[in-house]
Image (cartoon, rainbow, N blue to C red):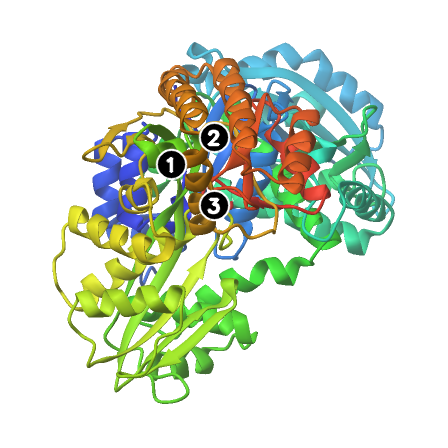
């Protein structure tokens, strides 16, 4: 089955993203080739036939929103949009929603309304009676215009009549054709029906027929999307779950009474819907017009969504909106990009596409409101805005990420600043001739400490945990890791600081470039000293960056060996599992033994894990030495414990492959008991484990060497609740996926 949760999509190259979608079954090989080769754009010849005076084809970013579960079906949402944060916001909202069952969407049979206006008669009731008497004949004439539509099960379903007073006091009568256009949006179908009925309507009632055209207020094609966000999932850094929930409800209430706020509120909804409409070749202007008219149908312009307090304290959102869209006909058949978008969406009918649009609009509304009531919209835009600015400044790819990070850090996000940074940093450090590498962190599910004594450990990678950029400069070495508050400088012949700087010095020595100058900037999404493989990830990422910069062509095996040397420097007696995960980035059953042995673990999905950092740094080297001391004093007991942990690691690998989470959770709990017995747990870790289990985790344990650090919790169906409980208690949550959207 397709899975819309795609690990690390944001950090992939465009070609890797396309390949991933192809491998997941969201793109067929032909579509993948078209996207890779740039042939998915609208051809000039086709464009010239669509509108007048064509001089080119205008481009917009084509992105993918992940994580959507709608009516129990997995979707990727294709989005064509230029505004930063929309794709990320929608993906993030969908990720939270799926933890509570995703989106439930219902829809009416989608009918398009055609209007025929009659004037010149002063008795509107008689006109409507005359038209009603000929209704069967009028329907027959209308249906005769598109016989193939009738064959497919479509056609006119009903006729309605309305009368209005014009400003001059005269009456106008309007006939509404309610037409099932099947999977076509249906504008051309309905307009041609209305044109064909002009003469018969005039004959039937004696009035003058004026306007005959569809209406874009598609209130016969209304879609309702509902979503529930668990209260525990709403907490974010610095904001309690209750404050986020109540803030969203209050913001929505504001949009129900103030049209100025409602306009911006609804624009946020349409940010999601329009992007999907454009990606699938639908008329976003018609959708917009209908949505805004519908928002005012009660006599005042109001919010299209409703956010309320659920009976259990959760946040419930509802979006009701008219959506008449198509999957065939019009520009869809001639626009290759639209055809690809439809295939990515994986919808079978126009009605299904409308339901997916509604879910997307509701997700975007939640993302916008959550940002508004917490850090503010601007904060969420900053990173993506910085990337847009760097792109506009034509910053070279090798310098791109570094320039973005500096602009964000200084909050000076301007094109001239990006250009200045791409030429050089203060102090004369050039960004030219630079390279970037990244590597994975790790989370050990089973096997800590026992793995040092030749037993097995079961571990998973934390993708793209650390990124390192290395740039050459005239002399000396400078190192900056802002997230770890590490800054160091030294020159050849000077003593080298400990820690990360010592690792860089070792790498420089092994590459035999101690006489050259380097500027090193690292970014990490995992904290240091928390048992998540930060040191190995940093070393592997730095080695890869140096390898590219110096064109040494080291193999991954050689990168792994050098990373292990760095781990020996940092930890003294490493098991080898951290460097293996950092370099190869694969789930693994690892054994040190006389020679390191690994068994890759094939996973169809990321297990439902929550990783939380205590904020108390552990020291792997000290913990390994302390356990060694206790082992030597009571070898028989510790051997028995390590043997049992070994058995659990092997059994856990099988359980993980078979998604037997109940067994895996039990093994994790027992393993933690053994780790507590060998005295590597702490009161803080024990408290975190209790919080996780009380919130619904079926397995929870420390991960890493202990003495502080982090815990990992297995919580199928309860990820958001467990994460929320730990976050609400003040602990940092580390995502298993690098794509935060």
| Left or right: 264 in relation to 51 | right
Q: Pointer 1: residues within 10 angstroms few (<14), some, or many (20+)?
A: many
Proximity of marks 2 and 1: CB atoms separated by less than 8 Å = yes
Quarter containing the N terminus: top left
Residue position marked by numbered label 3 in the rendering: 623
Q: Nearer the viewer, residue 302 or 624?
A: 624
Residue position marked by numbered label 2 in the rendering: 326
Q: Pointer 2: residues within 10 angstroms few (<14), some, or many (20+)?
A: many
- What percent of the width, then of the height, locates residue 289? 64, 44
Residue position marked by numbered label 1 in the rendering: 332
Residue 738 appears in the rendering: no
| Left or right: 477 in relation to 246 | left
- What percent of the width, then of the height, locates residue 43? 26, 50
Disc 3/disc 2 C-alpha distance (Å): 62 Å
Q: Secondary structure at mark 1?
A: helix
Give the farthest residue toward the bottom: 427
Q: Nearer the viewer, residue 274 or 388?
A: 388
- What percent of the width, then of the height, locates residue 224? 67, 26
């Amino acid at each position: 089955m397709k899975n819309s949760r795609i690990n690390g999509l944001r950090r992939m190259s465009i070609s890797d993203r396309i390949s991933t979608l192809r491998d997941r079954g969201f793109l067929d090989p032909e579509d993948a080739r078209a996207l890779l080769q740039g042939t998915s754009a609208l051809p000039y010849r086709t464009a010239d036939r669509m509108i007048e005076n064509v001089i080119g084809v205008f481009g917009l970013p084509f992105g993918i929103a992940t994580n959507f579960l709608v009516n129990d079906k997995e979707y990727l949402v294709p989005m064509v949009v230029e505004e930063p944060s929309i794709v990320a916001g929608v993906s993030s909202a969908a990720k939270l929603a799926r933890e509570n069952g995703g989106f439930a969407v219902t829809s009416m049979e989608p009918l398009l309304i055609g209007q025929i206006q009659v004037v010149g008669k002063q008795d509107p009731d008689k006109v409507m009676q005359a038209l009603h008497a000929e209704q069967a004949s009028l329907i027959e004439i209308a249906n005769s215009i598109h016989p193939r539509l009738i064959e497919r099960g479509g056609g006119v379903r009903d006729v309605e009549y309305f009368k209005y007073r014009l400003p001059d006091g005269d009456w106008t009568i309007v006939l509404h054709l309610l037409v099932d256009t099947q999977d076509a949006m249906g504008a051309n179908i309905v307009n041609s029906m209305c044109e064909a009925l002009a003469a018969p309507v005039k004959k039937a009632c004696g009035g003058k027929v004026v306007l005959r055209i569809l209406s874009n207020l598609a209130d016969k094609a209304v879609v309702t999307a509902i979503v529930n966000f668990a209260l525990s999932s709403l907490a974010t850094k610095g904001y309690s779950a209750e404050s986020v929930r109540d803030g969203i409800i209050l913001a929505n209430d504001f949009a129900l009474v103030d049209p100025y706020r409602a306009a911006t509120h609804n624009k946020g909804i349409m940010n999601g819907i329009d992007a999907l409409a454009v990606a699938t070749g639908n008329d976003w202007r018609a959708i917009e017009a209908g949505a805004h008219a519908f928002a005012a149908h009660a006599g005042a312009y109001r919010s299209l969504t409703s956010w309320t307090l659920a009976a259990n304290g959760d946040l419930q959102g509802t979006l009701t909106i008219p959506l008449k869209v198509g999957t065939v006909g019009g520009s869809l058949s001639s626009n290759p990009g639209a055809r690809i978008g439809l295939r990515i969406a994986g919808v079978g009918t126009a009605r299904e596409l409308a339901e997916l649009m509604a879910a997307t609009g509701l997700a975007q509304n939640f993302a916008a409101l959550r940002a508004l009531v917490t850090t503010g919209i601007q904060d969420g835009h900053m990173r993506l805005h910085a990337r847009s600015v760097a792109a506009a400044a034509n910053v070279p790819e090798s310098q791109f990420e570094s320039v973005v990070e500096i602009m964000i850090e200084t909050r000076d996000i301007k094109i001239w600043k990006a250009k200045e940074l791409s030429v050089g940093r203060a102090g004369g450090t050039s960004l030219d001739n630079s390279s970037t590498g990244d590597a994975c962190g790790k989370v050990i599910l089973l096997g800590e400490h026992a793995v040092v004594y030749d037993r097995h450990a079961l571990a998973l990678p934390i993708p793209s945990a650390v990124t390192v950029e290395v740039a050459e400069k005239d002399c000396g070495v400078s190192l900056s890791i802002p997230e770890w508050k590490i800054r160091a400088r030294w020159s050849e012949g000077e003593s080298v600081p400990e820690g990360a700087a010592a690792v860089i010095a070792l790498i420089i020595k092994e590459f035999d470039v101690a006489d050259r100058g380097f500027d090193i900037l690292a970014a990490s999404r995992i904290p240091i000293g928390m048992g998540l493989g930060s040191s190995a990830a940093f070393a592997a990422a730095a080695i890869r960056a140096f390898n590219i910069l110096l064109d040494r062509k080291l193999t991954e095996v050689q990168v792994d060996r050098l990373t292990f040397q760095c781990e020996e420097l940092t930890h003294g007696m490493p098991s080898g599992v951290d460097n293996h995960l950092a370099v190869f980035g694969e789930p693994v059953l690892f054994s040190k033994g006389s020679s390191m042995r690994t068994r890759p673990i094939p996973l169809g999905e990321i297990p439902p894990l929550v990783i939380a950092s205590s904020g108390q740094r552990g020291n792997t080297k000290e913990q390994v030495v302390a356990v060694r001391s206790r082992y030597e004093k009571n070898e028989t007991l510790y051997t028995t414990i390590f043997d049992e942990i070994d058995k659990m690691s092997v059994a856990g690998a099988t359980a993980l492959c078979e998604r037997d989470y109940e067994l895996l959770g039990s093994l994790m709990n027992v393993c933690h008991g053994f780790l507590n017995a060998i005295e590597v747990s702490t009161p803080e870790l024990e408290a975190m484990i209790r919080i996780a289990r009380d919130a619904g985790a079926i397995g929870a344990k420390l991960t890493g060497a202990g003495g502080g650090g982090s815990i990992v919790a297995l919580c199928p169906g309860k990820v958001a609740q467990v994460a929320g409980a730990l976050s609400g208690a003040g602990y940092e949550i580390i995502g298993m996926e690098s794509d935060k959207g």
